[in-house]
Amino acid sequence: MSKQKQVKTGWGISYGEMVSREFVKIRLNVVCLVFIIFLFAAAVLAPFLANDKPFVIRVDGELHFPIFKNLRASDYSVFLAAVVGVVQVLLIRRNRGRVDPSIRGAVLWRQVCISSLVIFTGVILSFVFVPRRLDATDYKGMVASGKATDAIFAPIPYGYGRTDLRFREQPPSREHWLGTDDVGSDVLCRLIHGSRISLSVGFVAVGISSIIGILVGAILGYFGGSVDFVGMRIVEIMMAIPTFFLIITIVAFFPRSLLNIMIIIGITSWTGNARFIRAEFFKLRKQDFVQAAVSLGLPLRSILFRHMLPNGIAPVLVNATFGIAGAIFIEAALSYLGFGVAPPTPSWGQMLSLGVSTTGRFLWWLTLFPGLAIFLTVMAYNLVGEGLRDAIDPRLRKAA
Amino acid sequence: MSEDGILLSIKGLSVSFFTEEGVAKAVQGVSFSIRQGKTFALVGESGCGKSVTALSIMRLVPSPPGEIVGGEITFGQRDLLSLSDKRMRSIRGNKIAMIFQEPMTSLNPVYTVGEQIVEAIRLHQRKSTSQAWSDAIEMLRKVGIADAERRAWEYPHQMSGGMRQRVMLAMAVSCEPSLLIADEPTTALDVTIQAQILDLLDKLQEQNGMSILLITHDLSVVAERADDIAVMYASRIVEMSKSRLLFVEPLHPYTQGLLRSVPRLGFSGKRLQMISGTVPEPLHFPSGCKFHPRCPIGCGDKRCQSVEPELREVRPGRCVACWHAPGYETEGERKSLMVGLCPHPTEL
């Protein structure tokens, strides 16, 4: 045992491990990270947390499982992806301790390939075998009227699309913990389902903007000269356009779909990343190890993305966490203004806009809770970004 | 490679940097050849163009602003300056390898040293990963790194400067290049480590039979190890010779000055002589012989001030570019067949 441990320490500490150790040292960072993980768990498990279909119900002596029948293919895909993701993280942790570093890369590569294959086939299967159906049965009514027994409901027994005009605009009560909105939907239920929208917008939009930003920035920074001159002017033109109004304009022309919003946020917010990467690459390309890589005869692709990028990725990584917060914010703002996802799909910004009802009443619970959700999520991401920046930058670390 | 044992020959190489302040002629008409399995030393002060010469061989002169404006570099049978980028890439690291001055920064900090050597090996040789790994560890052992199996898993920041330079050497030699360009390989190291690294270079040269282009400003480094030596001053070669002769009887006033300014054992108490003045900037080279403002002989001479002397062979194996060098006009005029090109010592 002790010998194995010795070997382990002999393998050296990678940059990632060093940063994560620094990151974990500060408690606030950990709290924020846990909050974000909690949020992700809630988003993934949303149908089990808040659903008007019961897990189990006995109708005429026969057991039914309505909740599973009503899960959509996309739900299954999300579960699958989440499970594979968690397994992947566990495998990487295990590999670090056990697998010889020389084959670790190959092992990881194989695992990633298998995982993506699993996800790919899983998604296809779930779309083929789980046709979408609409179950409009009122299970709660059945229980109340005595038609059915032994029902086990989700903790929040309301569906996000269910309207109940008898309970419109109700303040928080024992039935509806965070009240109801203008069509009688439960606010907590919509909040939980809305987290899916916010988190996925954040990730996909930032993913798109990071990829574009890295590609553009890498090319501008490495080649410099006239390429850089022309490129930077284009970037500056992009920066001069007020992004938010551009987004509103573009969104107005396209159908209101989540994917469109993600893509539009992504392709309008890459300029910051491009500038960061360009600046880093300017610095890096003069460095000896880049010269050494060139003198070894490595192809350009490898020099840019294998040797330079890992050394210059830090600001983009930090920017990405801020970017996720920003994207969530933009999505909320768009939905608030009515340019976001179409109404039955819940979104935090959209709920916020219902705070002042058509009758002119101020519904505080519809303002406070979605607002709080947006605020906490954005703040958690910002704090994680800040923590990451401090962990990455040793000079800042010393000064603090 | 070539019939007369010459691996690489440079003829009339000129490199200029086109900056906003003007054209800086970093290298002007430099010619020399490197013999197979021998060490060629290029000596000069910082900024004299020796590193740019080395980078030109690798075609790594930063462009823009730098540009190779003239000359040819023949490696074996190939003209390096006319090769396509792809062909050039297959020569870099494979046939010609390079190590740099700063071992602290010439390894990528995010990969273990083993990974970096493996990458170099796998780039030019068809080998499986595990084969490349065992080769890499073997290489590390060869360059004198103890406990190579473990050290291969360490990141560069876990190693000392001398160790990193050894790793760089292992990486450079891993593909068994026929020419190793060592650009000030020991400048950043402690004196004791310097000697070790130079000995290691010798050992590797012996084992692989490769040629070395040793670039340095330190004459003591060159004295024992170089087979041929060229002294550069302000973008030109001013003297070229077999090393021993150069140290015994320097012909160019600059070389004489350099040798006088090196401290020697047994000469304590005396003030070291220095060369007065400063190295001219590439943007404002003096007219005529570039050394004349600092030269004890030439500072009053009209010809030194107006006409730049070319490199001529004044006696077997000795070339110099100085109007006042003994035999420069008589012997040199007769023997130099090509303008600006001194025949190599071996060709005689």
Image (cartoon, helix red, strand yellow):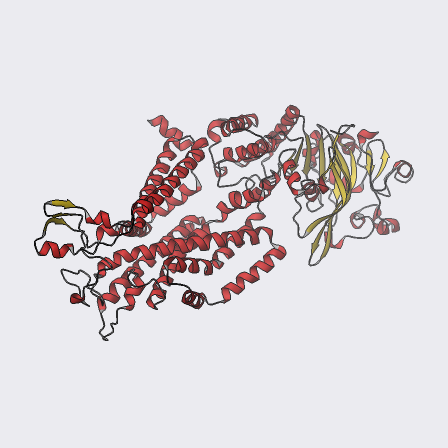
In the foreground, B265 or B180: B180
Q: Is residue B289 positioned above or below A245 on the image?
A: above
Instruction: Write down the quadrant of residue B261 in the picture.
Output: top right
Q: Residue at x 88, y 51 (%)?
A: B302
- Is residue A164 in view from this perspective? yes
Residue A172: give x, y in percent of width and height.
17, 64
Q: Residue at x 22, y 57 (%)?
A: A159
Residue A342: give x, y in percent of width and height.
32, 63
Q: How many numbered markers are drawn? A: 0
Q: Is residue A75 left or right of residue A221?
A: left
Looking at the rendering, in which quadrant would you find the N terminus of chain B?
top right
In the foreground, A140 or B113: A140
Residue most extreme to the left = A146
Q: Is residue A335 left or right of residue B44?
A: left
Q: Residue at x 26, y 56 (%)?
A: A192
Instruction: Write down the quadrant of residue B12 in the picture.
Output: top right
Q: Is residue A255 left or right of residue B168?
A: left
Residue A92: give x, y in percent of width and height.
37, 37
- Is residue A386 in view from this perspective? no
Residue A80: give x, y in percent of width and height.
32, 44
Residue most extreme to the top = B207
Looking at the rendering, in which quadrant would you find the C terminus of chain B?
top right
